[in-house]
Image (spheres, rainbow, N blue to C red):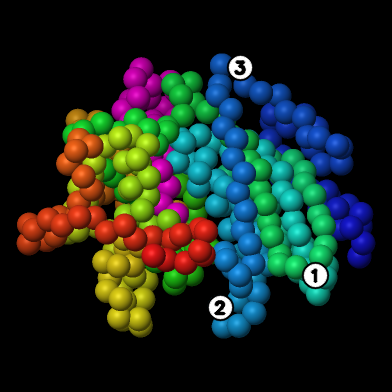
Amino acid sequence: MGELSLIRQFRRDPPGHPWLKVGPGQDCAILRWGEGRDLAFKIDQVVEGTHFLLDGPEASSPRRIGWKAMAKACSDIAAAGCWPVAAAVAVNLNRRLDDAWAEELHAGLAACCARFNFALAGGDITTSNGAVTVCVSLLGEGPADGAWLRNGAKPGDWLLVTGELGGSRGGKHLDFIPRLEEARRIRALLSGQKPGAASPEPRVHACIDITDGLARDAGHLCEESRCGVEIDEAALPVSAAANEAAQRDGRGVLAHVLGDGEDFELLLAVEPQAAAALLKDWQEATPLRRVGTVLPEGAGRRLKHADGTVEPLPDVGYEHRTGGSS
């Protein structure tokens, strides 16, 4: 099947959205934008050999690759406290892959759009002898009271984490659910109103999704907010996959929890009283836990062990430039 035939196949029933006025088939998608709302804009990619493998015992199916590519961009939209509206996708396919592979990739992309009810508005396909890449550009709707950023954490804020950590190498990095619904629920509970209603003042002071590992992403939040942080080892939500990985490689559970990338959970800095109320009222299936406290910048970044001793928080995590953990 040629490129045009493949595009026609993808255009048969693309996920839509009420704000999508013109979708696939034109030079540009056209959106009607909600009045008084911020626009969140994200671009992200997954690359063969870095984010997924096509060969060997850890080879990924094309559907899982498509899901991951779209969900990875959604995770950043969730970290901003926003909601996705429309995505455009650019794909480079290796010549050895057949049409069925490309269709399954598209099915994974579309499944994520359908799961969270946003549009797959268009894209681009090319073919080469090189690595497969999937690049997603995603637009999101910002709430009336403004997006969450990384630079607003304040000393005394509680650090909260969704889900469990350290499980990415057990397959979670392909099948994770971006925490869009959890972010929306947090906003609703902290505003005391229904989802989508405006909050009188922000209670979430900062947020980041955990993609480079808890320790490194906490460091990113500290850099942007000019603060310190204390992580409580005893409070860390350890996944079963982290325990299994530690048994296999002998690195230790804490090393996986702090340093393994692609957990795709949210790390939030929340005003203390609001955080306590949020944890009390939280009844969602996804756990939400306090894992630490924001400190003044001069206090540094530290790890508190179960026995009460404190040491500097290790600067460990995924390094994008070298393509590995450090």
Q: Are marks 3 and 1 in contact (CB under 8 Å)?
A: no
Mark 2: give few (<14), some (14-19) or many (20+) Cα within 10 Å: few
- Residue at (28% x, 70% y) in the render: 253
Label 3 sits on what residue type? Glu
In the displayed structure, would residue 16 be above or below residue 11? above
Residue 150: name its quadrant.
top left
User: What mark, if any, has residue 58 been given in the picture?
Assistant: 2
Magenta stretch holds residue 42: no
Disc nearest the viewer among 3 and 1 = 1
From which residue to which does the magenta span run?
Answer: 183-211
Instruction: Give the Cα distance between marks 1 and 2.
Output: 22 Å
Residue picked out by circle 3: 35
Residue picked out by circle 1: 129
- Residue at (44% x, 72% y) in the render: 170
The foreground one among 224 and 163 is 224
Disc nearest the viewer among 2 and 3 = 2
Label 1 sits on what residue type? Asn
Q: Earlier in the sequence, mark 1 or mark 2?
A: 2
- Which structural element holds mark 1? loop
Instruction: Give the Cα distance between marks 2 and 3.
Output: 46 Å
Position of residue 314 in the picture relative to residue 262 (left or right): left
- Residue at (62% x, 44% y) in the render: 43
Instruction: Give the Cα distance between marks 3 and 1.
Output: 45 Å
Q: Is residue 212 visible?
A: yes
